[in-house]
Amino acid sequence: MPELPEVETIVRDLKKTIVGQTIGSVFVDHAKTVAPLTIKEFELQLKGLKISEVSRRAKIIIISLNQISKTAIPYFLLIHLKMTGQLIFTPQKGKIVIGGHPQPGGATDLPNKFTRINLKFKDGGNLYFNDMRKFGWARLMTEDEKNKTLKPYGVEPLSVYFTEDILKSIFTRFKNRSIKKALFDQNYIAGLGNIYIDEACFISGIKPDKQASLLTDSEIKNLRNAIISVLKLSIKSRGTSARNYVTADGTKGGFVKHLKVYGREGKECKTCGTLILKIKHAGRGTHFCPECQK
DNA sequence: GTGTTTGTTATCAA
DNA sequence: CTTGATAACAAACA
Protein backbone atom coordinates (compact mmCIF):
# COMPACT_ATOMS: atom_id res chain seq x y z
CA MET A 1 0.00 0.00 0.00
CA PRO A 2 2.54 2.55 0.95
CA GLU A 3 4.18 4.51 -1.83
CA LEU A 4 6.85 7.17 -1.47
CA PRO A 5 4.85 9.73 0.58
CA GLU A 6 3.61 7.12 3.03
CA VAL A 7 7.07 5.60 3.54
CA GLU A 8 8.58 9.07 3.84
CA THR A 9 6.00 10.02 6.49
CA ILE A 10 6.83 6.93 8.53
CA VAL A 11 10.57 7.57 8.21
CA ARG A 12 10.23 11.19 9.36
CA ASP A 13 8.20 10.06 12.36
CA LEU A 14 10.67 7.33 13.31
CA LYS A 15 13.62 9.72 13.05
CA LYS A 16 12.06 11.63 15.94
CA THR A 17 11.19 8.62 18.07
CA ILE A 18 13.58 5.68 17.74
CA VAL A 19 16.98 7.13 16.83
CA GLY A 20 19.36 6.63 19.75
CA GLN A 21 17.29 3.86 21.26
CA THR A 22 18.68 0.43 22.07
CA ILE A 23 16.80 -2.75 21.24
CA GLY A 24 16.15 -4.78 24.38
CA SER A 25 14.34 -7.75 22.88
CA VAL A 26 12.72 -8.88 19.66
CA PHE A 27 9.70 -11.08 18.97
CA VAL A 28 8.92 -12.47 15.53
CA ASP A 29 5.91 -14.63 14.78
CA HIS A 30 6.19 -15.19 11.03
CA ALA A 31 9.35 -16.76 9.63
CA LYS A 32 9.00 -15.50 6.04
CA THR A 33 8.94 -11.88 7.19
CA VAL A 34 12.56 -12.05 8.42
CA ALA A 35 14.01 -14.55 5.92
CA PRO A 36 16.67 -15.57 5.02
CA LEU A 37 17.49 -15.45 8.74
CA THR A 38 15.55 -17.78 11.00
CA ILE A 39 13.36 -16.24 13.68
CA LYS A 40 15.91 -17.14 16.35
CA GLU A 41 18.84 -15.70 14.40
CA PHE A 42 16.94 -12.49 13.69
CA GLU A 43 15.91 -12.04 17.31
CA LEU A 44 19.39 -12.73 18.67
CA GLN A 45 21.27 -10.58 16.15
CA LEU A 46 19.07 -7.51 16.64
CA LYS A 47 19.11 -7.64 20.40
CA GLY A 48 21.41 -5.03 21.93
CA LEU A 49 21.87 -2.99 18.73
CA LYS A 50 21.42 0.76 18.86
CA ILE A 51 19.51 2.70 16.20
CA SER A 52 21.69 5.41 14.71
CA GLU A 53 19.62 6.57 11.74
CA VAL A 54 16.38 6.06 9.84
CA SER A 55 16.17 6.80 6.13
CA ARG A 56 14.37 5.85 2.92
CA ARG A 57 15.29 4.70 -0.58
CA ALA A 58 12.41 4.07 -3.01
CA LYS A 59 9.72 2.41 -0.86
CA ILE A 60 12.26 0.81 1.46
CA ILE A 61 12.79 1.95 5.06
CA ILE A 62 16.41 1.76 6.19
CA ILE A 63 17.13 1.52 9.90
CA SER A 64 20.88 1.86 10.56
CA LEU A 65 22.21 -0.01 13.57
CA ASN A 66 25.48 0.20 15.46
CA GLN A 67 26.50 -2.10 18.19
CA ILE A 68 27.73 -0.63 21.45
CA SER A 69 31.29 -1.79 20.88
CA LYS A 70 33.45 0.21 18.50
CA THR A 71 34.79 -2.81 16.67
CA ALA A 72 31.35 -4.10 15.76
CA ILE A 73 30.14 -4.24 12.17
CA PRO A 74 27.36 -1.81 11.31
CA TYR A 75 24.09 -3.49 10.42
CA PHE A 76 21.10 -2.28 8.49
CA LEU A 77 17.50 -3.35 8.91
CA LEU A 78 15.73 -2.87 5.60
CA ILE A 79 11.95 -2.97 5.69
CA HIS A 80 9.53 -3.16 2.77
CA LEU A 81 5.88 -2.73 3.72
CA LYS A 82 4.58 -4.04 0.37
CA MET A 83 0.77 -3.94 0.25
CA THR A 84 -0.43 -3.94 3.85
CA GLY A 85 2.59 -3.36 6.07
CA GLN A 86 2.50 -0.92 8.98
CA LEU A 87 5.29 0.33 11.22
CA ILE A 88 3.94 1.81 14.42
CA PHE A 89 5.90 3.12 17.39
CA THR A 90 4.42 3.39 20.85
CA PRO A 91 6.47 5.02 23.59
CA GLN A 92 4.74 3.35 26.53
CA LYS A 93 4.85 -0.17 27.82
CA GLY A 94 2.02 -2.61 27.39
CA LYS A 95 -1.07 -2.78 25.25
CA ILE A 96 -1.83 0.38 23.31
CA VAL A 97 -5.13 1.26 21.71
CA ILE A 98 -4.76 3.03 18.39
CA GLY A 99 -7.06 5.96 18.92
CA GLY A 100 -10.03 5.73 16.60
CA HIS A 101 -8.25 3.79 13.89
CA PRO A 102 -9.33 0.16 13.73
CA GLN A 103 -6.92 -2.03 11.82
CA PRO A 104 -7.89 -4.49 9.10
CA GLY A 105 -9.73 -7.34 10.69
CA GLY A 106 -11.16 -4.98 13.25
CA ALA A 107 -8.18 -5.06 15.61
CA THR A 108 -7.74 -1.79 17.49
CA ASP A 109 -4.85 -2.61 19.79
CA LEU A 110 -1.16 -3.43 19.68
CA PRO A 111 0.15 -5.97 19.31
CA ASN A 112 -2.65 -7.59 17.30
CA LYS A 113 -3.17 -10.66 15.11
CA PHE A 114 -1.27 -8.99 12.24
CA THR A 115 1.80 -8.08 14.28
CA ARG A 116 4.70 -9.96 12.70
CA ILE A 117 7.59 -8.28 14.52
CA ASN A 118 7.80 -6.48 17.84
CA LEU A 119 10.99 -4.60 18.68
CA LYS A 120 11.02 -3.79 22.36
CA PHE A 121 13.35 -0.95 23.33
CA LYS A 122 15.23 -0.81 26.58
CA ASP A 123 13.36 2.29 27.70
CA GLY A 124 9.98 0.60 27.28
CA GLY A 125 8.89 1.74 23.82
CA ASN A 126 7.74 -0.70 21.13
CA LEU A 127 8.05 -0.75 17.36
CA TYR A 128 5.41 -2.97 15.76
CA PHE A 129 5.60 -4.29 12.22
CA ASN A 130 2.07 -5.34 11.29
CA ASP A 131 1.35 -6.95 7.94
CA MET A 132 -2.02 -8.49 7.20
CA ARG A 133 -1.08 -10.11 3.91
CA LYS A 134 2.47 -11.13 4.87
CA PHE A 135 4.03 -9.79 1.66
CA GLY A 136 6.28 -7.38 3.52
CA TRP A 137 9.75 -8.19 4.78
CA ALA A 138 12.40 -7.03 7.23
CA ARG A 139 15.94 -8.05 6.40
CA LEU A 140 18.97 -7.56 8.58
CA MET A 141 22.06 -7.05 6.44
CA THR A 142 25.60 -5.75 6.26
CA GLU A 143 26.54 -2.57 4.43
CA ASP A 144 27.56 -4.48 1.31
CA GLU A 145 24.30 -6.39 1.23
CA LYS A 146 22.36 -3.16 1.77
CA ASN A 147 24.14 -1.45 -1.10
CA LYS A 148 23.53 -4.42 -3.35
CA THR A 149 19.84 -4.45 -2.45
CA LEU A 150 19.37 -0.74 -3.16
CA LYS A 151 21.51 -0.55 -6.26
CA PRO A 152 18.89 -1.39 -8.93
CA TYR A 153 16.54 1.42 -7.95
CA GLY A 154 16.13 4.41 -10.22
CA VAL A 155 16.08 8.13 -9.61
CA GLU A 156 14.35 9.57 -6.55
CA PRO A 157 11.58 11.82 -7.89
CA LEU A 158 12.09 14.40 -5.13
CA SER A 159 15.83 14.67 -5.76
CA VAL A 160 17.65 17.17 -7.98
CA TYR A 161 18.49 14.29 -10.31
CA PHE A 162 14.86 13.95 -11.39
CA THR A 163 15.15 16.28 -14.36
CA GLU A 164 13.08 16.68 -17.51
CA ASP A 165 15.98 15.18 -19.45
CA ILE A 166 16.01 12.06 -17.27
CA LEU A 167 12.27 11.63 -17.62
CA LYS A 168 12.54 12.10 -21.36
CA SER A 169 15.27 9.48 -21.67
CA ILE A 170 13.19 7.03 -19.65
CA PHE A 171 10.19 7.55 -21.91
CA THR A 172 12.40 7.11 -24.95
CA ARG A 173 13.51 3.76 -23.59
CA PHE A 174 9.91 2.69 -23.03
CA LYS A 175 8.97 3.80 -26.58
CA ASN A 176 5.76 1.94 -27.42
CA ARG A 177 4.90 1.02 -23.87
CA SER A 178 2.66 3.31 -21.82
CA ILE A 179 3.74 6.14 -19.53
CA LYS A 180 2.10 4.34 -16.61
CA LYS A 181 4.32 1.33 -17.24
CA ALA A 182 7.37 3.58 -17.28
CA LEU A 183 6.43 5.42 -14.10
CA PHE A 184 5.73 2.10 -12.39
CA ASP A 185 9.18 0.68 -13.07
CA GLN A 186 11.19 1.08 -9.85
CA ASN A 187 14.44 0.56 -11.75
CA TYR A 188 13.92 3.88 -13.52
CA ILE A 189 11.91 6.01 -11.08
CA ALA A 190 11.83 4.93 -7.46
CA GLY A 191 8.83 5.28 -5.21
CA LEU A 192 5.78 5.84 -7.39
CA GLY A 193 2.86 3.43 -7.21
CA ASN A 194 -0.66 3.12 -8.50
CA ILE A 195 -2.20 6.03 -6.61
CA TYR A 196 0.33 8.76 -7.39
CA ILE A 197 0.83 7.67 -10.99
CA ASP A 198 -2.89 8.08 -11.67
CA GLU A 199 -2.96 11.37 -9.76
CA ALA A 200 0.10 12.81 -11.52
CA CYS A 201 -1.32 11.85 -14.90
CA PHE A 202 -4.57 13.65 -14.09
CA ILE A 203 -2.81 16.78 -12.86
CA SER A 204 -0.74 16.95 -16.04
CA GLY A 205 -3.72 16.17 -18.31
CA ILE A 206 -2.22 12.99 -19.76
CA LYS A 207 -3.96 9.63 -20.16
CA PRO A 208 -1.99 6.98 -18.22
CA ASP A 209 -2.12 4.47 -21.07
CA LYS A 210 -0.68 6.91 -23.60
CA GLN A 211 2.39 5.64 -25.44
CA ALA A 212 5.53 6.94 -23.73
CA SER A 213 7.36 7.96 -26.88
CA LEU A 214 4.46 10.18 -28.00
CA LEU A 215 4.81 12.69 -25.17
CA THR A 216 5.84 16.19 -26.19
CA ASP A 217 8.52 18.09 -24.29
CA SER A 218 5.89 20.28 -22.71
CA GLU A 219 3.87 17.25 -21.58
CA ILE A 220 7.00 15.77 -20.01
CA LYS A 221 7.64 19.04 -18.22
CA ASN A 222 4.06 19.12 -16.90
CA LEU A 223 4.20 15.49 -15.86
CA ARG A 224 7.45 16.01 -13.96
CA ASN A 225 6.00 19.00 -12.15
CA ALA A 226 2.82 17.05 -11.38
CA ILE A 227 4.77 14.12 -9.91
CA ILE A 228 6.81 16.41 -7.68
CA SER A 229 3.85 18.49 -6.53
CA VAL A 230 1.56 15.54 -5.77
CA LEU A 231 4.27 13.75 -3.78
CA LYS A 232 5.12 16.88 -1.80
CA LEU A 233 1.49 17.70 -1.07
CA SER A 234 0.82 14.14 0.04
CA ILE A 235 3.82 14.14 2.37
CA LYS A 236 2.47 17.37 3.84
CA SER A 237 -0.85 15.55 4.41
CA ARG A 238 1.00 12.55 5.90
CA GLY A 239 0.06 10.21 3.05
CA THR A 240 -3.02 8.48 1.63
CA SER A 241 -4.91 6.12 3.93
CA ALA A 242 -7.03 4.42 1.29
CA ARG A 243 -6.97 1.09 3.09
CA ASN A 244 -4.40 -0.21 5.55
CA TYR A 245 -1.86 2.56 5.75
CA VAL A 246 -1.30 4.38 9.01
CA THR A 247 1.59 6.62 10.05
CA ALA A 248 4.20 5.59 12.59
CA ASP A 249 2.02 6.93 15.42
CA GLY A 250 -0.93 4.83 14.26
CA THR A 251 -2.98 7.71 12.82
CA LYS A 252 -4.32 7.98 9.28
CA GLY A 253 -2.87 10.14 6.54
CA GLY A 254 -5.03 12.95 5.21
CA PHE A 255 -4.44 12.87 1.46
CA VAL A 256 -7.59 10.94 0.48
CA LYS A 257 -9.57 14.17 0.34
CA HIS A 258 -7.11 15.56 -2.21
CA LEU A 259 -7.38 12.60 -4.58
CA LYS A 260 -8.70 13.67 -7.97
CA VAL A 261 -9.13 10.32 -9.73
CA TYR A 262 -7.87 7.40 -7.63
CA GLY A 263 -10.86 5.63 -6.09
CA ARG A 264 -13.25 8.15 -7.66
CA GLU A 265 -14.56 6.07 -10.56
CA GLY A 266 -18.16 6.98 -11.40
CA LYS A 267 -17.87 10.29 -9.57
CA GLU A 268 -17.71 13.71 -11.20
CA CYS A 269 -14.36 15.12 -12.23
CA LYS A 270 -13.53 17.99 -9.92
CA THR A 271 -12.45 20.08 -12.90
CA CYS A 272 -15.08 19.46 -15.59
CA GLY A 273 -17.83 17.31 -14.08
CA THR A 274 -17.36 14.40 -16.47
CA LEU A 275 -17.58 11.00 -14.77
CA ILE A 276 -14.20 9.48 -13.84
CA LEU A 277 -13.48 6.21 -15.63
CA LYS A 278 -11.64 3.18 -14.35
CA ILE A 279 -9.98 0.72 -16.69
CA LYS A 280 -7.50 -2.08 -16.23
CA HIS A 281 -4.10 -1.12 -17.56
CA ALA A 282 -0.61 -2.34 -16.77
CA GLY A 283 -2.30 -4.95 -14.60
CA ARG A 284 -3.76 -2.32 -12.28
CA GLY A 285 -6.94 -0.37 -11.78
CA THR A 286 -6.31 2.84 -13.71
CA HIS A 287 -8.37 5.98 -13.12
CA PHE A 288 -8.71 9.02 -15.37
CA CYS A 289 -11.02 11.75 -16.64
CA PRO A 290 -11.83 11.13 -20.32
CA GLU A 291 -12.35 14.85 -20.84
CA CYS A 292 -9.34 16.36 -19.01
CA GLN A 293 -6.79 13.74 -20.03
CA LYS A 294 -5.72 13.09 -23.61
C1' DG B 1 -18.67 -18.01 -4.57
C1' DT B 2 -16.86 -13.59 -7.30
C1' DG B 3 -14.06 -9.89 -7.86
C1' DT B 4 -11.21 -6.44 -5.98
C1' DT B 5 -6.99 -4.49 -3.44
C1' DT B 6 -1.65 0.61 -2.52
C1' DG B 7 3.86 -4.09 -4.32
C1' DT B 8 6.97 -7.11 -6.60
C1' DT B 9 8.62 -11.11 -9.14
C1' DA B 10 8.33 -15.24 -12.06
C1' DT B 11 6.57 -17.36 -15.93
C1' DC B 12 4.06 -18.01 -20.12
C1' DA B 13 2.28 -16.42 -24.60
C1' DA B 14 2.05 -13.79 -28.80
C1' DC C 1 14.06 -9.50 -28.27
C1' DT C 2 9.79 -7.09 -26.97
C1' DT C 3 5.60 -6.67 -24.72
C1' DG C 4 1.59 -8.02 -22.36
C1' DA C 5 -0.94 -10.87 -19.48
C1' DT C 6 -1.35 -13.79 -15.66
C1' DA C 7 -0.29 -16.06 -11.43
C1' DA C 8 1.73 -16.10 -7.14
C1' DC C 9 2.56 -14.51 -2.44
C1' DA C 10 -2.13 -14.09 1.47
C1' DA C 11 -5.95 -11.94 3.57
C1' DA C 12 -9.85 -9.09 3.98
C1' DC C 13 -13.86 -6.96 2.20
C1' DA C 14 -17.98 -5.68 -0.68
Image: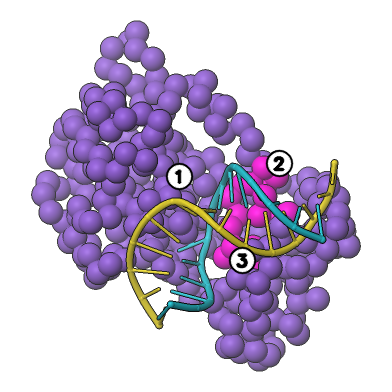
Chain colours: A purple, B cyan, C yellow
The Cα–Cα distance between marks 3 and 1, rounded to whole angstroms, is 20 Å
What is the span of residues highlighted in magenta in the rendered image? Answer: A182-199
Verify whether residue A88 appears in magenta. no
- Assign a secondary structure to mark 3: strand
Mark 2, residues whose alpha carbon is within 10 Å: few (<14), some, or many (≥20)?
A: few
Which is more foreground, mark 1 or mark 2?
1
Mark 1, residues whose alpha carbon is within 10 Å: few (<14), some, or many (≥20)?
A: many
Mark positioned earlier in the residue sequence (3 or 1): 1
Residue A227 in sight from this viewpoint: yes
Mark 3, residues whose alpha carbon is within 10 Å: few (<14), some, or many (≥20)?
A: few
Say above or below: A14 vs A75.
below
Residues at marks 3 and 1 on the same chain: yes
The residue type indicated by label 2 comes to Tyr
Disc 3 chain ID: A
Furthest toward the top, the residue is: A71
The residue type indicated by label 1 comes to His
Residue that mark 2 sits on: A161
Q: Tag on residue A177?
A: none
Residue A75, percent across and down? 39, 23
Disc 2 chain ID: A
Residue A183, percent across and down? 69, 55
Residue that mark 3 sits on: A284
Which is more foreground, mark 3 or mark 2?
3
Residue that mark 1 sits on: A80
